[in-house]
Image (spheres, helix red, strand yellow):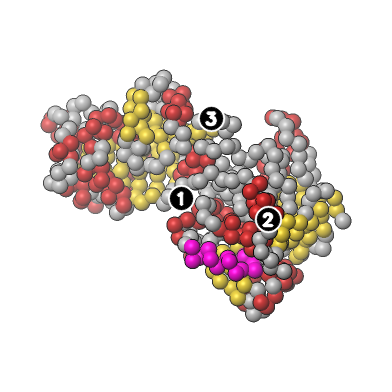
Amino acid sequence: MFARVSAAVLAFAVLLPAQHPVPPPTLLPGTRLLAGGGKLPPAVFTRFLERAGATNGRVVLIPTASETADSAESRAALLQRWQQDHPGPTYTVLHTRDRAEADREDFTAPLRAATGVWLGGGAQERLAAAYLGTRVERELQALLARGGVVAGTSAGTAIQTRTMIQEGMDPPVMATGFDLVPFAISDQHFLKRQRLPRLLRALAMHRGHFGLGIDEGTAVEVHGRTLTVLGASKALLVLAAAGSWPERVVTLAAGEQQDLVAWQRAAVARLGPAWPPAQVAEPAVPHGAVLLHGGGALGPDTTARFLALAGGAKAVVVAVPSAAPTSERRTDPMLAALRAAGATVRELDAAAPAEVTAALLAQLDTATGVWFGGGRQWRLCDAFDGTGLVEGLRAVLGRGGVVGGTSAGATILGDLLVRGDPIGNTAMWCEGYQRGFALVPGVAVDQHFVVRERLRDLQGLLGTFPQFLGLGLDEGAAVVVRGHELEVLGSGKVAVLARGVVADGEARAAAAASREPVWLGPGARWDLRQAAGR
C-alpha cells in the first residue's frame, strides 16, 4: 500500500505553482510609533508615554532633524515644553552632529537607561548623517529589544525604515534609514501634501517593500505584529503595481488595524508572478487520500476512515497542532481515537521556519498519516512556509498514506487559502496569506459552513477567483478525496460550488453570485472532474 513516491507524483508536484520565498513571521519587540507630522492630538502622546512607562518613564528627546537643534536655547525650550505638557516622566535631550561623539559610550548612556525615545521633525537626512551606523542606532534597537518605544514625527517617521525617502517628488531621492520596520517605506504629511504618487514611485524603485503613508495629525503604532492607527486623519497601506499584480491601497482611520506580517509577505510575494494564475490545477489527489473535516464533533465514521487510510493499528501518524497557540489547545479527539486504537502518534510542532528542523521533518519519512488540528490557518503558513513540510506531505500521499485536518487544518490543505487574515476570520482572502498547501489543488475550502452561514462569503470569494472550485464543509461533515472522487462522511452537509468562467468586472461577480451550490449529504459521492454526482 505504501509504495515509493512515483514519478507521476513528482511531476504533479512540479506542476503546482510555487510560492515565492516569504519573510519569516516577525513579532517585533517593543513599540514603534510613526507620526505624520503637523499638530498631533493628545492620543498620540498619551500612547507614547503609556508605552514608555507613564510617570515612571525615562524619555530621551532627539531633536537632531531640526536645523535649530544646535542651539542650547532651542534644546532647553524643547525640554521645558515636554516637562510642562506631559509631566511625570524624566526627560533628557540628546543631540550631536558629530558621528564620533554619537559612537561614544558616555554620550549614549541616556539611551541605555531610556524606556522611550522621541525623534523630532525636520530633515531626515540630518538624523541619518549623525546617527546611521553609530552606537546611537544600535542603542535604539536595544531599547526596542527590552520592550521600550521609539517614536517620531515627520522626519522622525521617515528615518524609521531602512529604505527611506529623503526628499523630492518625481523621482523621490532615496537614502538609508534605521531598520525599525522591516520591508516598509514610510512617508509623512501624506494626504495634506498629496504624496501617494511619490510613495508609489519609491515602491516601484524598491520592489519587495510595502508603503506606509501617514497623514498629519495621525500616527501608526507598530506593536508586536499589529499596526494600529491613532489620531485625527488617516494612514494608507500601499503596494505598487508589479507585473500583473495590480496596485493596492488600503485606507485606515483611527482605531483600525492591519497585520504587519501579512503586508511584509504581500510585498515580497510581488517579487514573483501574480498568484493565483488564471488557470489552476485540476482538483485531484492522484495518490493516497486527503480527509477534510469542517470542524465541530468528529463522527466515529470519520475517525475510523482516517485510521483505516493510515494503516489501522499499525498506523504511524504525525500530528501538527501549530494552527493554535499552545495556550489555546485542547485534547484532539482524532489523536485520542488513534492512540486508543494502538496507532503510533508523533508531534511536529513549530511556530516559525527556524524551528522546523531536519529531525522534525524526518518524522514524515515513516509516517502513514498526518493530522492537522484546528485554530487559524495563517499560523501554519507562518510556521512552515519555505520549509520542507509540503514536500514531506506529498511524499506521505505518494506512499499511499493520508493527510487530514479539521477546521483550519482542513482549509490549509486546499489551494486558495480562505480566511487567512491574522486580524480576524471574516475577511475571505488576505494577499499576504493567499495560498494553502495545495494538497487538493484548484480548491478553496471553507468550514463551519452552515452553522455560521458562510455561503455568501464563499460565493463572493469565487466571484473574484472563479477558476477555483469551492468546498463548504459544515460542522460534523468530512470529505475524503481520492483521485477525482469526493466522498462525504459524518453528519453534516457539504456544499460544492463548481468552477466559473474567468471574466471581467461585473460579469465575473454576477456569475459567481448566481453559482448555486450542490448540497451533498452523508454517503454521497461527487466526481470533481466531471462535476456530476454518482
Q: Using the rendered view, name the quadrant where residue 491 is placed.
A: bottom right
Q: Nearer the viewer, residue 523 or 174?
A: 174
Residue 271 seen in this snapshot:
yes
Magenta region: 358-371
**How far apart, in angstroms, are the residues tagged by discs 3 and 2?**
38 Å
| 40 relative to 16 in the view: left or right | left
Q: Return the x and y of residue 78 as percentages of the image width and height.
A: 20, 34
For mark 3, give the secondary structure.
loop
- Residue that numbered label 1 is attached to: 24
> How many residues crowd around disc 1 within 10 Å: few (fewer than 14), some, or many (20 or more)?
some
Residue at image location 73% in from the left, 35% down from the top: 502
Q: Main secondary structure of the magenta part?
A: helix
Residue at image location 61% in from the left, 68% down from the top: 367
Task: Tell me if residue 364 is in the magenta stretch.
Answer: yes
Outermost residue toward the right in this view: 534
Reply above or below: 482 against 256.
Answer: below
